[in-house]
């Protein structure tokens, strides 16, 4: 009997409480789902279980029978969302890293069990291929195989199947059930509500660093989870989808027309899409569906091909500003707030005599922008790193909007952003579109689509599988059901 | 049939041998060209010269490859090579800035200890202080050069003509370390080179140490999550690198029979060039001992061949620079080609 428990665990990062009195009690034999919106504390909990973080107060304990395990992380195997693997090594070598067994000789994993796991995951044929040559799906399976081969008590799967096909996911769930059956603790974190329904006996819903409720057995359904994921207050406040709040349907020629376009590396195929002015378009789809890649292509960040095989970028049709998902790729950490706001500009907006720049002009521009984009900051000379994630994101967005392009493409606009900044960011995006421009967002959360979009395009396996006009959607669960039904096809 | 050929293309061992083969072909090509112009090239005497010129380069390059495999670099090896020899010579023979002398064995130990100290400082500054190893080892390169000059007082030491003359057995022992000639006039030094290659090959390809270096260099973040002892290994490779530089310095001193203030830091750059020509990536995570050996052979052969052709040392330098760039560029291009073939093979395998 293994038991994973914790009482009143807290963890702060500066002013943010990532975990705020979390209680845990999980016994062996269960597959427990951990659900929660972005920023709820899932990744902090993951890092804590993996021993990469320690709690400010409270402690996670692991007991086996009557004995308390000393270093919990030694008994925890984590399957990370972004695989922690070695691209310069073969699949087989990857399995052996850290558990080589002997100090001399040809280093290979324990052959019998390794072969069994690789076959089970369907990647035995790649044993001697280098990971850099293999797709994300295989890399993810290598990460899973590494966890399976470790002798742990707790197995934590963080979005394990984002790059797997339906059948591969099914096989993975079967393996997880076997692990649970053999007396291990299995935890699953995922954005796909359907996966919870398919494999968990119990769901913990995490919100604002605490477990808000548990859903058990027969009560588990996509609707019940979705209802718990959306806090009651906001559900009331946002009773209407964003599209109903502002005047929809601006007529006019599309800003961008895609005619059976395909990705050069096959991430998406045969995409036909018009981007109308005045609208916010959400691209939805799990990792590997091609939705993210399509957003990048529309952001002129990723060249693609039309039917004739000619390679081009959307810049040929309209001016585009693209914002990557991670602020690591969008924020200039060495610059001030004002400099960040001016970072995408050049020429006359920075000074009277280009290419020379005029600090006074930049200051004035920054002061204006700080007000316009509702950035909470000590001033334009404050270092950007002194801002909260939400305000950094507003600066990033402001810098792109100052560029005055026809289209803004943004991946995960509110990743790691607090609730109040989220509302500001959605409003900024909608205002931008209302000027007769267009916004494309790649979203991972139903709530976000509901809050910001006018149109939704759903991708699966690289193709468009559904289009939704948000004018016809009244509630979040309704949207969730609809999106899930498209993705299930 | 298509299946087997595609999986063959993706197989890592096959890819590695293809690249090694390319390097070997380049070496043969150079040999053929030089031989056609200067028939003395393949004479036993010249081959001996050639092998002899590879000793220091090869020994130091093996250890440097491990440093580079980890994504670091050691620019100080040339200076440490000189430092170890100078410290040994000064302590043993006197005549430098030090007012005393010690027996040969103590002097040898001190020379190697000095090299290890340099490696330890490289490791400390890189691991603990977090400085980039490029800066650390650039600094230590100058520190070591300066220390050599200070200790040796810019003297040229020649054991056989020293005053006072060291005991007979010490002279013989020292000469026997690297300079003595065996059958067919092969110097003892070459045995050290062969031993170093075998030991480093085992270390790199048949021990957990080498295996983990590969992992740590390929993805330090994943290595951290897997709790591999990254810091210890960094210390270890810097210590190894300096130790090999020290040994090579003393062996060359033994072979040449004298050591002076002009010991070259240029060795560092030759070594790095050889490792990189041998297919190692300065970003870490890529590099083999056989590749390094071939890189060393290619570089030594170019030096030797160009000297035979009598182009003059200026042109020689220029040529070696161009060849280094061309070799790495070619490797990059061919790697890309092979890699995309490997990816296609993998993808078709996945689809199946």
Image: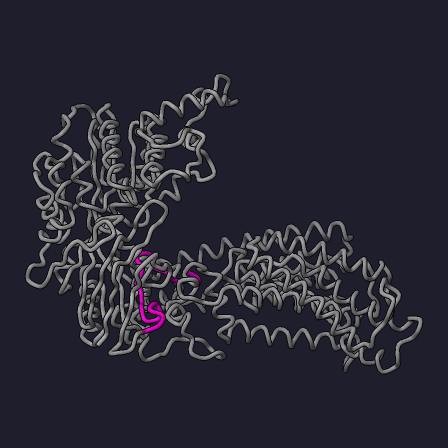
Q: Is residue A312 visible?
A: no
Give the x, y percent position of residue B284: 51, 59
Look at the image and give the residue range highlighted in magenta: A69-88
User: In the rendered image, which quarter is residue A132 located in?
Assistant: bottom left
Q: Nearer the viewer, residue A227 or B158?
A: A227
Give the x, y percent position of residue A316: 33, 31
Task: Judge left or right: residue B115 versus residue A180.
Answer: right
| Residue occupying the point 30% across, 59% down | A46
Q: Nearer the viewer, residue B312 or A214?
A: A214
Task: Judge left or right: residue A354 versus residue A271.
Answer: right
Up-down: is B128 above or below A471?
below
Up-down: is A469 above or below B81?
above
Give the x, y percent position of residue A478: 8, 44
Q: Is residue A216 visible?
A: yes
Task: Judge left or right: residue A317 versus residue B66.
Answer: left
Query: Across the whole image, how many numbered discs are drawn on residues?
Result: 0
What is the chief secondary structure element of the magenta stretch? loop
| Residue occupying the point 40% across, 72% down | A96
Residue farthest to the top, as pictured: A352
A76 inside magenta stretch: yes
| Residue occupying the point 77% across, 71% down | B45
User: In the rendered image, which quarter is residue A312 located in?
Assistant: top left
Residue farthest to the right, as pictured: B163
Give the x, y percent position of residue A107: 44, 75
B68 inside magenta stretch: no
Q: Nearer the viewer, residue B81 or A121?
A: B81
Q: Quadrant of the N terminus of chain A?
A: bottom left
């Amino acid at each position: 009997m293994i038991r994973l428990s914790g009482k009143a665990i807290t963890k702060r990062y500066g002013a943010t409480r990532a975990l705020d009195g979390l209680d845990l009690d999980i016994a062996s034999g269960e597959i427990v789902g951990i659900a929660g919106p972005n920023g709820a504390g899932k990744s902090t909990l993951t890092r804590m279980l993996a021993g990469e973080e320690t709690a400010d107060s409270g402690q996670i304990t692991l007991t086996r029978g009557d004995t308390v395990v000393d270093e919990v992380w030694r008994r925890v195997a984590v399957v990370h969302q972004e695989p922690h693997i070695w691209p310069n090594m073969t699949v087989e070598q990857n399995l052996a890293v850290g558990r080589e067994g002997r100090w001399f000789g040809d280093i290979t994993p324990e052959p019998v069990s390794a072969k069994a796991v690789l076959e089970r995951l369907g990647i035995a044929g790649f044993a001697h291929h280098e990971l850099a040559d293999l797709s994300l799906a295989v890399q993810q399976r290598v990460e899973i195989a590494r966890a399976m081969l470790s002798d742990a008590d707790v197995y934590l799967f963080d979005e394990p199947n984002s790059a797997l096909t339906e059948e591969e996911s099914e096989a993975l769930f079967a393996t997880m059930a076997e692990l649970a059956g053999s007396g291990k603790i299995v935890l699953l974190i995922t954005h796909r509500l359907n996966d919870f329904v398919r494999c968990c006996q119990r769901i913990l819903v995490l919100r604002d660093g605490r477990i808000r409720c548990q859903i058990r057995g027969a009560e588990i359904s996509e609707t019940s989870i979705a209802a718990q994921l959306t806090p009651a207050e906001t559900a009331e406040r946002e009773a209407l989808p964003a599209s109903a709040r502002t005047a929809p349907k601006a007529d006019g020629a599309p800003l961008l027309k895609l005619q059976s376009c395909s990705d050069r590396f096959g991430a998406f195929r045969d995409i036909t899409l018009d981007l109308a002015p005045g609208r916010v378009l959400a691209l939805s789809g799990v990792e590997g569906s091609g939705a993210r890649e399509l957003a990048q292509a529309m952001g002129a960040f990723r060249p693609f091909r039309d039917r004739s095989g000619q390679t081009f970028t959307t810049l040929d049709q309209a001016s585009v500003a693209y914002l990557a998902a991670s602020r690591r790729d969008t924020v200039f950490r060495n610059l001030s707030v004002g400099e960040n706001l001016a970072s995408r500009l050049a020429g006359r907006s920075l000074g009277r005599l280009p290419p020379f720049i005029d600090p006074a002009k930049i200051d004035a521009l920054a002061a204006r922008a700080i007000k316009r984009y509702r950035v909470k900051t000590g001033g334009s000379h404050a270092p950007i790193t002194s801002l909260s994630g939400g305000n950094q994101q507003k600066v990033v967005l402001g810098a792109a909007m100052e560029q005055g392009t026809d289209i803004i493409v943004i991946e995960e606009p509110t990743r790691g952003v607090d609730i109040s900044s989220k509302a500001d960011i959605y409003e900024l995006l909608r205002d931008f579109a209302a000027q007769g421009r267009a916004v494309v967002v790649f979203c991972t959360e139903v709530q976000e689509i509901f809050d910001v979009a006018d149109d939704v395009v759903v991708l699966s396996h690289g193709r468009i599988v559904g289009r939704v006009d948000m004018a016809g959607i009244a509630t979040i669960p309704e949207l969730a059901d609809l999106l899930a039904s498209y993705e299930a096809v | 049939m298509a299946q087997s050929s595609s999986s063959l293309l993706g197989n890592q061992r096959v890819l590695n041998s293809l690249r090694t083969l390319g390097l070997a072909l380049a070496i043969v090509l150079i040999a053929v060209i030089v031989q056609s112009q200067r028939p003395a090239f393949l004479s036993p005497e010249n081959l001996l010269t050639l092998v002899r010129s590879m000793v220091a380069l090869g020994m130091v390059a093996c250890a440097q490859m491990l440093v580079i495999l980890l994504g670091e670099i050691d620019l100080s090896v040339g200076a440490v090579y000189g430092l170890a020899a100078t410290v040994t010579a000064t302590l043993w023979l006197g005549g430098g800035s030090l007012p005393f002398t010690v027996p040969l064995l103590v002097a040898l130990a001190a020379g190697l200890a000095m090299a290890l100290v340099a490696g330890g400082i490289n490791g400390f500054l890189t691991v603990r202080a977090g400085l980039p190893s490029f800066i650390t080892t650039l600094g230590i390169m100058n520190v070591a050069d300066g220390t050599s000059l200070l200790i040796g007082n810019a003297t040229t030491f020649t054991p056989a003509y020293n005053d006072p003359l060291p005991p007979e057995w010490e002279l013989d022992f020292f000469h026997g370390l690297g300079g003595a000639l065996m059958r067919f006039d092969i110097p003892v030094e070459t045995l050290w080179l062969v031993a170093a290659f075998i030991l480093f090959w085992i270390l790199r390809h048949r021990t957990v140490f080498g295996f983990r270096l590969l992992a740590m260099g390929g993805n330090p973040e994943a290595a951290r999550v897997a709790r591999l002892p990254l810091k210890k290994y960094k210390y270890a490779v810097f210590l190894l690198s300096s130790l090999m530089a020290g040994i090579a310095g003393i062996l060359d001193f033994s072979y040449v029979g004298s050591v002076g203030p002009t010991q070259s830091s240029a060795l560092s750059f030759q070594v790095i060039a050889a490792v990189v020509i041998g297919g190692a990536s300065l970003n870490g995570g890529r590099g083999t001992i056989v590749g390094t050996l071939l890189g060393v052979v290619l570089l030594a052969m170019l030096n030797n061949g160009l000297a035979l052709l009598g182009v003059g040392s200026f042109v020689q330098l220029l040529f070696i620079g161009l060849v280094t760039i061309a070799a790495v560029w070619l490797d990059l291009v061919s790697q890309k080609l092979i890699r995309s073939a490997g990816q296609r093979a993998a993808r078709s395998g996945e689809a199946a």
